[in-house]
Amino acid sequence: MTSARIPPAASASAAVSARSATSASPVVHAWHALRTLRTPHALRAVRAPRPARPAAVPWLALIALGYALVQFLVVLPHTHLALGWDESVYVSQSDPRTPAAFFSAPRSRGISYLVAPVTAVSPSVPLLRGALAVASAAALYGAFRGWVPLLGRRTAALAALLFAGLWITGLSGSQVMPNLWVALGAVAAVGWFLRVPDEPRARWWLAGTLACCALLRTPDCGWVTLPLLVTAVCVRRLRPALPALLGGPALGAAQWVAEAYARFGGIAGRLRVSSATEGGMGLHHGFGAGAAAALRSLNGPLLCRPCDHYTLHQPALALWWLALPPLAAAALPVAVRRGRPLAVTAVPLVCAASVAVPYLLLLDYSAPRFLLPAYALLAPPVAALAAGAVRTSRARRSAATPHPAPAARGRRRTGNRCATAAVRIGALTPAGLVIGSVLALHLVSQAAVLSGTSAQAAVVADRYRQAARTLRRLGLHPPCLVVGPHAQPVGYQAGCASADTEGNNRSIAPRALLRRAAHEPTAVLTAGAGPGTGPPAYARNWTAHPLPRTGGWLAYLAPAPAATAPHREPRMAPAPPRPQPPSAPVAPAAP
């Protein structure tokens, strides 16, 4: 008969119980006996404490923090003094200290509402840009945090890095422009849309993100929402998202629709005026005219309009843009072959293509910021493709490499850690090292372009600031009016109203302008004194003043209005003498 084998831990426990029983009361002895009978042997054994698992590295938070640091260290030192052309228009809508600039039909007011709390507190441009830099980093984290359940922590962080590493993303974070915020809202909305079947609260987040997108830029939100609606109708598991897909954009676009009826006669009228402002949207420009313009302006300028005389500089830095469509196309079949959910890859790809259609096919000019929503939506599929390649290479290498024998019990834990780290580094070969090297080169090239374009944007914004400073020295003080192609940013810097008599921002007729110039200080800005750059006909007799440090700009000041001339009492004709009643004769004054 063999005796049962008692673990050392159990025997030690029994010995302790026996010793305690001899000196304790019978009640305590009975309690120990009852616990010994009713408790399983595995629970009675004293277990060794498990080693604590190392905390996961917060890659996504680190990338968001790095994105904010890049803005503070690279972008803000160049652009913290003045606002750009479009930025002045958006900020003037919510700044209580300056008149609102002309707001054209293609714009939406969401970005003006976003910066309103900052402009209400202070007119400081550095404060505004710093607040936007912090807010954009937080929004980057929140937008890609929704993809963690779909892709995993590391792949979602890689997607955020791919998007945040673009130079136009780094430049746009602290700018008062809607395109980056639409991009972050779009990638967040698609992530919540894909999580609707498993999470009921995802519908509320989907509606909220789409409402924000529509408030920031209503047409772009429509192009993003259209593929989601088609997908929800066709896929039964995604049909619970339909109320959010209809209600969210409708709520966000309410202000845009109301303004369309108030100013343009309805939605169709606003779309017609918007198309005319953009130069006529359609395929009549030639198929792919917008794509050609986007390629020419890929590394700058910030606005390529017209784009015929621009050529792509530093073509080697544009290889990522040319490689992006093949990578996106390869992501779908690879996902199918690996057995991943098709919607996680296909839906963001279709939404990216949809939101890029008007800018690549329907316009004849471009700006790098136009394609930010498409870049953000392409980042998750491309990141999943890269992460899958690394995992496949690691699995093949692990299968081909013989596993070493288990380590001896007495080996130190430090040696095990070093061995594990060496295995992980070796598993990156070859795909991991290649992808990591390509990503590092890409980020370095984007940082170089970011530094150059930030300096160029600072030069243009400084011209507006110098022009406004000279106009104030010439006597242009609020209330005043600035007219011309650069009237919006210069007028905002000077604290004046702005207007234009021609072009896409035509907001006043020459006759109305002359009536206004008779009552308040008015200046007309021109690009110089060359052919075709002279003053308009109504300002030919106005006084010309050069604007230093602006590249040859001239300002034509209207004659001093009567309201600002020295006040003089009008001369009155002497009143006739009133008849005096008869009185006693007055004695003549003594000599």
Image (tube, grey):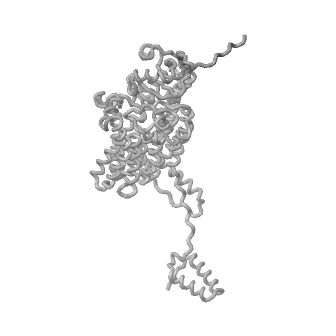
Can residue 409 be seen here? The reply is: yes
Badge count: 0
Question: Looking at the image, which is closer to me, 120 or 328?
Answer: 120
Considering only vertical position in the picture, is 331 above or below 409?
A: above
Residue shown at 45% from the left, 30% from the top: 302
The image shows residue 314 at horizontal and vertical percentages of: 45, 28
Question: Looking at the image, which is closer to me, 260 or 568?
Answer: 568
The image shows residue 306 at horizontal and vertical percentages of: 39, 24
Question: Looking at the image, which is closer to me, 484 or 426?
Answer: 484
Q: Is residue 67 left or right of residue 297?
A: right
State the residue lying farthest toward the right: 591
The image shows residue 490 at horizontal and vertical percentages of: 50, 27
The image shows residue 375 at horizontal and vertical percentages of: 41, 40
Considering only vertical position in the picture, is 424 above or below 178?
A: below
Can residue 167 be seen here? The reply is: no
State the residue lying farthest toward the top: 591
Question: Looking at the image, which is closer to me, 220 or 469?
Answer: 469
Q: Quadrant of residue 24?
A: bottom right
For the C terminus, the image quarter is: top right
Residue shown at 39% from the left, 47% from the top: 211
Q: Quadrant of residue 223?
A: top left
Considering only vertical position in the picture, is 449 above or below 393?
A: above
State the residue lying farthest toward the bottom: 26
